[in-house]
Structures are given as C-alpha cells and as structure tokens.
Image: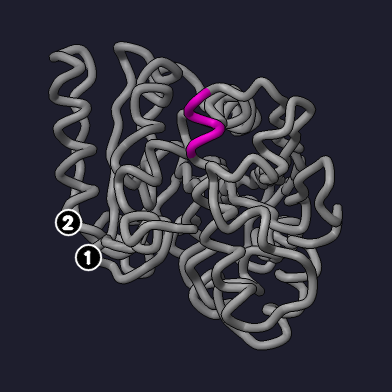
C-alpha cells in the first residue's frame, strides 16, 4: 500500500494546490519532456522576443524559452509560490550570464507589468487551477501585457485522455474524472483544456488555433515516467477508493504492486496535452 511519503506526494506547496510541489513539477516535466517541447513549438515564439512565462513553477520551461528567444531575447517569469519563483530564478542564474531572467513572485490574475510589455505570454499547466471566472481574468491579463499582434499561448492537461492498460478498465480514469466533475472544482477544470480555444476567443484574442497532443508511454518505461505515473495513479486511486467510486482501483494503490498495469511487460499510459494560441488585436483590429 501507499506509504506516508506517497500519501503526501505533491501537496506541500505554499499555494495549497495539489501537484504543484517542485519535485512533482520536475518529475512530470522529465516524464513528458518531448511532448512539452512539441507543445512549445506550437506557440511560434521567435528569436529576439521578450517572453513572459506566466505560472512558471520552478522554471522547467525557462531554458527552452531561452533557446527560442536567443541571445537577443529577454525572459520574464512569475509564479504564485515564492519557493517556485526562487527556484526558477536560481535555475536561470545557474545557466550563466547569457540569459538572465526577471523572475518574480506574483499572481497571474493581477500581473505587475505595464500594458504591451511582452511579445508573447507562455502559460503551461496553470489554468487547471483557475475557476472559469479566474481563467477569463487571467487570459485578459495576458492579452493586456502583450503588444498588439503579440502571442498568448496556453498549454494544459486534458484528463479525459488518461488511460492505463493492460488489465485495467480503459475508462476507469475517465469515469472517475467525469463523476468528480459534476461539481465545480479541480476535476472539472482538468476536463476543460479542449475548450481553451473558446476561452481565448472570449478574452478578445484573434486567430485562435488549438492542437491536442496525446502523450503516450509504453513499457519498458523510463524510470522518470514510471515513478511519476506510478505515484500519480496511486494518488487518484486513493481518492477514488475513499469516495467509493466504481471500478477496481486496487492494482493502482501500490506503485510497486506486480499487478499494477504500469508494471506489466506491455504496460501503457496516456494523457492529453492541449496547446491553444491566439494573438492580441492590433490598432486596426487585425492580428
């Protein structure tokens, strides 16, 4: 069964939000790095731009953003958790003098930047923590702080594409999130990602486009992949068991259980990555 350490996994951030602790953020990035890079490619960030990473976490995306803006570009970042902002600043400081980044603690619902400061805003794995009203407010803030014609790119998880095989009910996780999403809150927000294009349009962004990427992992899984998903599935299984949710969650309760589908020689797990991109209107109303 899950140890006490596993029970508290991912829930120690000063924000009080689950899956925001540094080791969890880093573990997921390590497990899904190729898919994250693919999503970032969709944003169309160019060399020489000034880019804000809004909700930067511990700064996993900052080195990738630095590579895209190049030596003539600039980076800024902000995160609600003070410890995340500190780690992000340290990450870029350790990278060397080539790419300094202005990293601050702050709220994406009230960005401490002037109108039109940035060429692009990048926001990854953050909108899942926002209510509908907060999401619209954040997107309007992103639109405000980019220049006319600037880019707003939002990436987040689509939990409807989570499935594990073989042996497990392929709809076990889908049914869990669908049942939990009957009331407002985090579960419902994890199912909202494929509506991001509509939210960007409602916030006044133009030329909105969206892509969904299925992030798939097959056995034999990389240790980073195996550890992250083993613990993540165990957390969900514990919640489902405590709520007496339908389905057989027992194999997922212990990441080391031989019956756990992720330990099967033909183990498989997937989740969704959605990237939505829009541009701020110009003075004439065209992107």
Disc 2 secondary structure class: helix
Q: Residues within 10 Å of mark 2 (few under 14, many from 20)?
A: some
Vertically, is 250 above or below 259?
below
Instruction: Provide residue 248's location: percent of width, then percent of height.
Output: 76, 65
Dominant SS in magenta: helix
Q: How many marks?
A: 2
Q: Which residue is mark 2?
A: 82
Asked whether residue 106 is in view, the answer is yes
Q: Looking at the image, is mark 1 or mark 2 earlier in the sequence?
A: 1
Dividing the picture into quadrants, the one containing residue 15 is: bottom left
Examine the rendering and report whether any part of residue 152 can be seen: no
Position above or below: 167 against 90: below
Q: Which mark is residue 56?
A: none
Say if mark 1 contacts mark 2, CB within 8 Å. Answer: yes
Label 1, secondary structure: give it. loop
Image quarter (top left, top right, bottom left or bottom right) of the C terminus: top right
Q: For this rendering, which residue is in front, 193 or 168?
A: 168
Q: Which residues are magenta?
A: 223-227
Q: How far apart, in angstroms, are the residues tagged by discs 1 and 2? A: 8 Å
Q: Is residue 71 above or below residue 141?
A: above
Q: At x 79% / y 28%, what residue is drawn?
A: 266
- Which residue appears at 39% of the width and 63% of the height? 7
Above-or-below relation of 199 to 286: below
Left or right: residue 183 versus residue 214 is left
Q: Is residue 101 magenta?
A: no
Position of residue 90 in the picture relative to residue 281 (left or right): left
Q: Residue at x 63, y 55 (%)?
A: 205
Of the numbered discs in the image, which one, if any, rests on residue 14? 1
């Amino acid at each position: 069964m899950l140890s006490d350490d596993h029970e508290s996994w991912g829930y120690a951030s000063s924000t009080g939000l689950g899956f925001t602790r540094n080791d969890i953020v880093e573990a997921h990035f390590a497990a899904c790095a190729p898919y994250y890079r693919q999503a970032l490619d969709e944003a169309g960030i160019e060399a020489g731009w000034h880019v804000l990473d809004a909700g930067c976490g511990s700064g996993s995306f900052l080195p990738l953003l630095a590579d895209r803006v190049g030596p003539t570009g600039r980076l800024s970042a902000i995160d609600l958790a003070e410890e995340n902002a500190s780690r992000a600043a340290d990450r870029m400081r350790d990278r060397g003098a080539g790419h300094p980044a202005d990293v601050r603690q702050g709220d994406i619902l009230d960005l401490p930047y002037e109108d039109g400061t940035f060429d692009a805003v990048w926001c990854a794995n953050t909108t899942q923590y926002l209510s509908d009203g907060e999401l619209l407010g954040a997107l309007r803030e992103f639109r405000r702080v980019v220049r006319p014609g600037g880019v707003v790119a939002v990436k987040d998880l689509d939990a409807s594409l989570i499935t594990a095989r073989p042996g497990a009910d392929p709809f076990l996780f889908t049914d869990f999130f669908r049942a939990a999403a009957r009331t407002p809150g985090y579960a419902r927000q994890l199912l909202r990602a494929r509506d991001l294009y509509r939210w960007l349009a409602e916030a006044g962004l133009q030329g909105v486009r969206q892509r969904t990427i299925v992030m798939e992992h097959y056995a034999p899984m990389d240790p980073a992949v195996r550890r992250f998903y083993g613990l993540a599935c165990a957390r969900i299984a514990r919640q489902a068991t405590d709520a007496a949710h339908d389905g057989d969650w027992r194999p997922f309760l212990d990441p080391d259980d031989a019956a756990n589908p992720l330990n099967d020689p033909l183990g498989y797990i997937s989740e969704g990555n959605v990237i939505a991109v829009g541009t701020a209107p110009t003075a004439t109303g065209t992107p």
